[in-house]
Image (cartoon, helix red, strand yellow):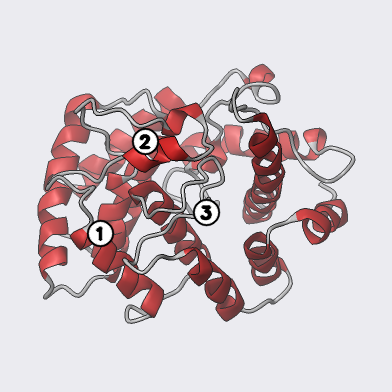
Amino acid sequence: MNFNKAKEFIYKNARPLDFARWQFLFEDGSRENVLSILKMYQNEDGGFGHALEADCWNPDSSPVQTWAATQIIREVDLKEREHPIILGILRYLENTKYFDGHVWANSIPSNEAYPHAPWWNYTDVNEVNYNPTASLIGFILRYASPKSRLYQTAQRLLQEAYAWFKLHCPLESMHTASCFVELFEDSVECNISGIDLSEFESLLQLQMKHILTADTSVWASEYVCKPSLMIHSCNSRFYEENKELCNFECYFLSETQQEDGTWAVTWDWGCYPEEWHISKNWWKSDIIIKNVKFYLSMQ
């Protein structure tokens, strides 16, 4: 892997947020700098919008864009429960109209007014979707006060989500599966009772065997599930069972990095071509950061 080429692309092309993430992760940059830029994407209601998740340009707060913010909070390992960004997220999750008492909405109506990928189209079909709900439950359990009403709600939601996962495992959606991995890891980290964490782990092992794309010949050209989506270091509980595929992904990253330091973006909006061109460039920096993180975590 050519670290310097990756760095050069970031310095020339990344959004300020991704530039700050790069510096924090790989150059002893400031956590506070990442958070101060992240704050710019947060609305008054505590939720996030403004294309933080680069496939949707909606400025309005949505559960998915707010989930994207929680990913960066995890990445910088923010532990301060009283941080204003965290308090805002918790306030949004408790009060948003896009929570029906069981799950947060995967898409919202105002998405339709702004450029976005087709998978963020709004539909009013009432089917249970735990992307991003499963991950958001874990975030609440990690950061909310155990005395709060929201925390008590999250405890109930945890049991509902786990019962649903047991019934539907293995899932076909890699992103929903990834959200359940995050829920499991938060539950372990917080020593949550009320569900069988040993059983949960076993189910997730089966889930990974089902969802990880073993046909590595399609990795470079298709949007598939690679280990890095769910296994973030060799200390993961899921590493040993998938060690061979993790090691191959490191080799794959070394072999497929492009001359400009990037990796291929293997999806396309198929609409809004001008905006997609911009978002695609944003995604290149995000992919660089995630790939370098994964590669280094496996060494």
Dot 2 crowding, Cα within 10 Å, few <14, some 14–19, many 20+:
many
Which residue is disc 1 drawn over? 93
Q: Position of residue 283 (x, y in %)?
A: 65, 44
Q: Is residue 160 above or below residue 220?
A: below
The residue depicted at 34 percent of the width and 54 percent of the height is: 185
Farthest front residue in view: 113
Which residue is disc 3 drawn over? 52
Q: Is residue 94 visible?
A: yes
The residue depicted at 68 percent of the width and 39 percent of the height is: 280
Looking at the image, is mark 1 or mark 2 earlier in the sequence?
A: 1
Q: Is residue 188 visible?
A: no
In contact (CB < 8 Å): disc 3 and disc 2: no
Looking at the image, is mark 1 or mark 3 earlier in the sequence?
A: 3
Q: Nearer the viewer, mark 1 or mark 2?
A: 1
Which residue is disc 2 drawn over? 177
Q: Which quarter of the figure has residue 269?
A: top right
Name the side, left or right, on which 111 lies relative to 34: left
Dot 3 crowding, Cα within 10 Å, few <14, some 14–19, many 20+:
many
Q: Is residue 98 above or below residue 126?
A: below
Amino acid type, callout 3: Leu
Q: Position of residue 288 (x, y in %)?
A: 70, 49
Amino acid type, callout 2: Ala
Q: Position of residue 159 (x, y in %)?
A: 12, 47
Amino acid type, callout 1: Leu
Q: Which quarter of the figure has residue 281?
A: top right
Name the side, left or right, on which 218 lies relative to 198: right
